[in-house]
């Protein structure tokens, strides 16, 4: 499924790479070079309809044990709103979308390469996860589904009251009774 991001005028004003002249094809070639420079020789591009997915395998070492993990990325496609207030449309910004994906992937791989993060940490949401029914998803997609259904719970995920909700004030104190 294509992730579509519709940019408002404020987002467009701050958007990097909006003047890029680098095509999607050239960017994909640079992504392949980036993978190969990082020792990743097994990769796959899949295109179904408007959705494109990059998958690759990478050796990851954690606590002295090497794992062969699969990773999956689906570049988000950015759309710019064009036209008047009441008569507008969204136009695909393909070259910009692909440049942003290239720099995202490059920064993640460099974080691993230079020891800033472990691969499983920086790429965790993109690790391919096989479900009991045999289907495939990523850990990030699984986590999002668990948050949605309430399967994932804990103190950090509990409901936090809005500012408008009244929060009772509790003060704990030690006190000493004075004798008269």
Image: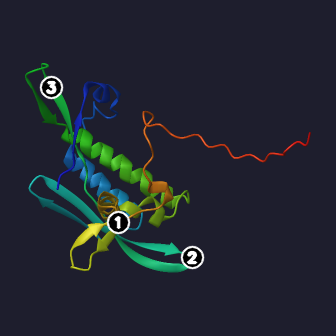
Q: Which disc is residue 151 wearing? A: 1
Q: Secondary structure at mark 3?
A: strand
Q: Nearer the viewer, mark 3 or mark 1?
A: 1
Residue that badge 2 annotates: 63
Q: Secondary structure at mark 1?
A: loop
Residue 105 is left or right of residue 26, and the answer is: right
Please tell me whether residue 84 is drawn above or below residue 32 in the rendered image: above
Classed neighbour count for the residue bearing mark 3: other residues with Cα under 10 Å, few (<14), some (14–19), many (≥20): few
The x and y percentages for residue 180 are 92, 39
Q: Earlier in the sequence, mark 2 or mark 3?
A: 2
- Identify the element where label 2 is drawn: loop
- Quick check: marks 3 and 1 in contact, CB under 8 Å? no
Q: Residue furthest front?
A: 180
Residue 6, percent from left and from top: 21, 36
**Residue sitting farthest toward the top:** 84
Sequence-first disc among 3 and 1: 3
From what the image shows, is residue 91 above or below residue 133?
Answer: above
Residue on which disc 3 sits: 82
Figure quadrant of residue 163: top left
3D distance between C-alphas at marks 2 and 3: 51 Å
First along the sequence among labels 1 and 2? 2
């Amino acid at each position: 499924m294509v992730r579509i991001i519709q940019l408002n005028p404020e987002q467009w004003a701050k958007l990097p790479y909006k003047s890029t002249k680098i095509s999607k094809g050239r960017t994909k070639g640079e992504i392949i070079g980036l993978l190969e420079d990082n020792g990743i020789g097994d990769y796959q591009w899949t295109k179904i309809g408007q959705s494109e997915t990059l998958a690759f395998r990478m050796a990851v070492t954690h606590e002295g044990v090497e794992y062969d993990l699969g990773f999956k990325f689906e570049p988000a496609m950015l759309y710019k709103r064009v036209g008047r207030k009441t008569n507008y449309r969204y136009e695909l910004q393909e070259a910009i979308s692909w440049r942003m994906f290239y720099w995202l992937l490059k920064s993640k791989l460099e974080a691993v390469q230079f020891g800033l993060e472990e691969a499983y940490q920086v790429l965790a949401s993109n690790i391919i996860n096989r479900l009991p029914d045999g289907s495939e998803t990523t850990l990030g997609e699984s986590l999002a589904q668990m948050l949605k259904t309430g399967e994932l719970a804990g103190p950090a995920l509990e409901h936090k009251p809005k500012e408008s909700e009244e929060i009772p004030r509790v003060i704990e104190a030690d006190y000493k009774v004075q004798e008269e």
